[in-house]
Amino acid sequence: MPLSPDLLAILACPVCKGDLKYDPDAQTFTCEACRLRYKVVDDIPNFLVEEAEKF
């Protein structure tokens, strides 16, 4: 089940509260400002900063 457009519209980076870019193919949210990438696991975004990927 894909993430709903209503949910995508309100999600923000948990660190800087900035905009996130969603990549449906990779199932990730990316914050360019913080240089962090958050995974989506079983259609649930994982916004735990400790588990975010730095890039």
Image (cartoon, rainbow, N blue to C red):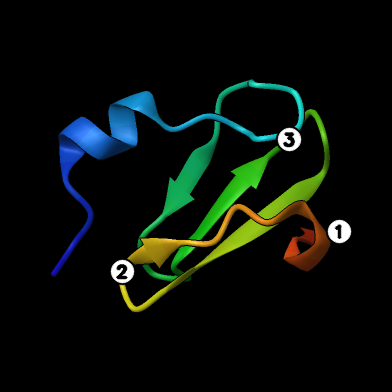
Q: How many marks?
A: 3
Q: Amino acid at mark 2?
A: Asp
Judge the density around disc 2: few (<14), some (14-19), many (≥20) Cα neighbours within 10 Å.
few
Mark pair 1, 3: CA separation? 10 Å
Tell me how far mark 2 sits from mark 3, CA to CA: 22 Å
The secondary structure type at the circle numbered 3 is loop
- Can you identify the residue that label 2 sits on? 43
Q: Which mark is residue 8?
A: none
| Residue 22 placement (x, y as % from top left) | 44, 47
Q: How far, Cα to Cα, is label 1 from label 2?
A: 21 Å
**Identity of the amino acid at label 1?**
Lys
Between discs 1 and 2, the one toward the N terminus: 2
Query: In the image, what residue occupies the spot 76% across and 53% down?
Result: 49
Q: Secondary structure at mark 1?
A: strand
Contact, CB < 8 Å: mark 1 with mark 2?
Answer: no
Q: Residue at x 54, y 61 (%)?
A: 46
Q: Which mark is residue 32?
A: 3
Residue in front for this viewpoint, 23 or 42: 42
Classify mark 2: helix, strand or loop: loop
Which quadrant holds residue 38?
bottom right
In depth, the one of 43 and 55 nearer the eye is 43
- Residue 1 position, x and y percent, is 13, 70
Q: Camera-side residue: 25 or 8?
A: 8
Question: In the shown orientation, is residue 20 left or right of residue 41?
Answer: right
Residue 27 or 25: which is nearer the viewer?
Answer: 27
Residue 45: x %, y % from top left: 45, 58
For residue 32, above or below residue 16: below
Tags 1 and 3 touching, CB below 8 Å:
no
Q: Name the kind of residue labelled 3 in the image.
A: Glu
Residue at label 1?
54
Decide if residue 19 is on the left or right side of residue 26: right
Please give the name of the residue rendered at 43% of the width and 32% of the height, measured from the top-left corner. Answer: 11
